[in-house]
Image (cartoon, coloured by chain):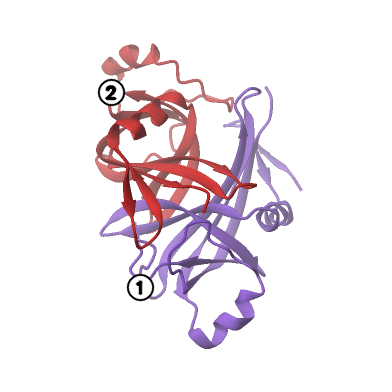
Chain colours: A purple, B red
Amino acid sequence: MTLFDARSGIEIMGRDECLELLRADVIGRVGVIQAGAPVVLPVNYAMDGDDVVFRTAPGSKLDTGPSARGCFEIDSFDRATRTGWSVMVAGRLEEVMPYAVPQLTQLNVQPWATGTRNHWMRLRSTRITGRIVRES
Amino acid sequence: MTLFDARSGIEIMGRDECLELLRADVIGRVGVIQAGAPVVLPVNYAMDGDDVVFRTAPGSKLDTGPSARGCFEIDSFDRATRTGWSVMVAGRLEEVMPYAVPQLTQLNVQPWATGTRNHWMRLRSTRITGRIVRES
């Protein structure tokens, strides 16, 4: 289902379409609040149901403490035609407990960066939204 | 100048390199805090010195009130070689006063979306950082 925001001229994507795009990609951006300021950092990720899971190094900026509010964004832009889309997942971040990690490893989240990234985080999604800007 | 974070295997970009990349692109992502939650939204932008300026519709999610903390991120990823880079600008958001808009219009920020976007915002940068993940 695609809606249309008359004010902005932006199409609103349905949840299923958003999830399809989220399941098709491997890298996106996590947004967190750190010391009162928003921070946006790219991460490799996978979807576990409707949640975003990713690995990070202990002590990373994304290590926000229990149940911090977070978001995750993916997008694709064509600068030549001035079109594109973006999907945002809003939710709460939680650390994945060690006993639950084995069932996530099959999701095959392979960080591109080297170094130890044994710390798994889950963004438990509460809201998934997407927007499309088509050629005008 | 490129440094190297031995823990993560990520190269740290120098400020000049970050600014060069920021000046070369036209679309990125603004991060703000809205009702206590981080929000990340794509915007068309231009650099005005070291600041990021962009246009938004009045009442937009990015209309955060005076001097809110904000950030801005651009990146480029090559999924085939598992490499990429990202640049983040941290700072404070401010509305551009109407008398200052004419000097920004020459920056030619053309939102891809239609609709009225006469509201100009400036992210007054306090910190610009960048990271590179090269082929390992």
> Residue most toward the bottom?
A99
| Nearer to the camera, B95 or B91 | B91
Secondary structure beneath dot 2 equals loop
Look at label 2 and name its amino acid: Gly
- Quadrant containing the C terminus of chain A is top right
- Left or right relative to B81: residue B15: left
Are callouts 1 and 2 both on one chain?
no
- Classify 10 Å Cα crowding around label 2: few (below 14), some (14-19), many (20 and above): few
**Residue at horizontal 36 percent and vertical 52 percent from the top:** A39
- Classify 10 Å Cα crowding around label 1: few (below 14), some (14-19), many (20 and above): few
| Nearer to the camera, A84 or B85 | B85
**Residue at horizontal 43 percent and vertical 52 percent from the top:** A41
Label 2 marks which chain's residue? B
The answer to which quarter of the image holds residue B108 is top left
Q: Position of residue B1 (x, y in %)?
A: 29, 37
Q: Position of residue A68 (x, y in %)?
A: 39, 68
Secondary structure beneath dot 1 equals loop
Q: Which mark is residue B49?
A: 2
Q: Position of residue B71 (x, y in %)?
A: 35, 44
**Residue at horizontal 73 percent and vertical 52 percent from the top:** A17
Vertical relation: A83 (above or below) A93:
above
Look at label 1 and name its amino acid: Gly
> Residue most toward the right?
A1
The answer to which quarter of the image holds residue A2 is top right
Q: Position of residue A31 (x, y in %)?
A: 43, 55
Q: Marks 2 and 1: in contact by CB < 8 Å?
A: no
Label 1 marks which chain's residue? A
Return the residue at label 1: A65
